Image (cartoon, rainbow, N blue to C red):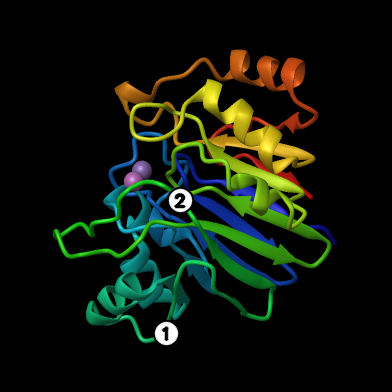
Amino acid sequence: MGIQLTWLAHSGFKLEIEGKTVLIDPFLTGNPLAPMKADELRADFILLSHGHGDHVGDTVAIAKRTGATVVGNFEIANWIEGKGVKNVAGLNTGGGYDFGFGRVEYTLAFHSSSLPDGSYGGQPHGILIFAPGTTFYHSGDTALFTDMQLIGDKGVDVAILCVGDYFTMGPTDSLDAIRFIRPSYVLPMHYNTFPPIQQDIAKWAQQVHNHTEAKAIVLDPGGTHEF
Ligand code: NI
Ligand code: MN
């Protein structure tokens, strides 16, 4: 049985790994592309890249309903706990922990991270997931940076990269990110949700094909791919 990856639109993903449901940045309420409602989602773990509302999203409601463990940076984990969520884990940059479904590591990301109420949200992060047989890298919101080569040195099979431009790196910089990370597969995220981040994703996929060694996988919101 492989790992099922479902795109929840924007930077939200659902991973089904050996019977555990792992959500990343579940932002459904207020997301014009959301393929389902937050109260339809199961979760055992919720991983957060940074504190912005389009990433923290429905985390508190989902965690309270399901009992999921919320993993974030130290500041975000404390803030989530303060909202009444029982199970939290606060990692920080460069650290990792094995949560049973696989080891999770928090990588560098170049962005900002204030929480929805303006609280300090610590540093933004990318997320590495060393699942059985497949390693995933979710870039979070970030600029292109050369230390993505070090992330690639860890052996990334599947890179999930922000490509929307305006708030994060755009399609052109993402091609350099792919060359630094050297994944077998790449998925785009953080595009088309809002007017400033509209992108021609078919054109991006063609450029990935023409200029990198990776295979682009473009999902529709709610679409699933098995790895
Ligand atoms: Ni952000
Ligand atoms: Mn964002």
Q: Considering the numbered disc 2 on the image, is that residue within a helix, a strand or a loop?
A: loop
Residue 3 appears in view: no
Question: For mark 2, what is the residue?
Answer: 109
Q: Earlier in the sequence, mark 2 or mark 1?
A: 1
Q: Which residue is nearer to you in this view: 125 or 138?
A: 125
Q: Position of residue 140 (x, y in %)?
A: 47, 49
Residue at the image position 34 percent from the left and 34 percent from the top: 167
**Disc 2 marks which amino acid?**
Ala
Residue at the image position 82 percent from the left and 58 percent from the top: 2
Residue at the image position 58 percent from the left and 48 percent from the top: 147
Query: Would you place residue 153 above or below residue 100 in this image?
Result: above
Residue 157 appears in view: yes
Q: Position of residue 134 (x, y in %)?
A: 78, 58
Residue at the image position 69 percent from the left and 73 percent from the top: 102
Few, some or many residues within 10 Å of mark 1 (<14, 14–19, 20+):
some
Q: Considering the numbered disc 1 on the image, is that residue within a helix, a strand or a loop?
A: loop
Query: Would you place residue 39 above or below residue 220 in this image?
Result: below
Query: Would you place residue 216 above or below residue 4 in this image?
Result: above
Query: Based on the displayed image, in which of its 4 quarters is residue 220 positioned?
Result: top right
Horizontal placement of 133 versus 26: left or right? Answer: right
Horizontal placement of 221 versus 38: left or right? Answer: right
Instruction: Name the quarter showing ligand 2.
Output: top left
Q: Position of residue 133 (x, y in %)?
A: 84, 62
**Disc 1 marks which amino acid?**
Asn
Q: Position of residue 55 (x, y in %)?
A: 37, 52
Q: What is the number of the mark on residue 87?
A: 1
Specify the quadrant that holds the N terminus.
bottom right
Q: Which residue is nearer to you in this view: 8 or 127?
A: 127
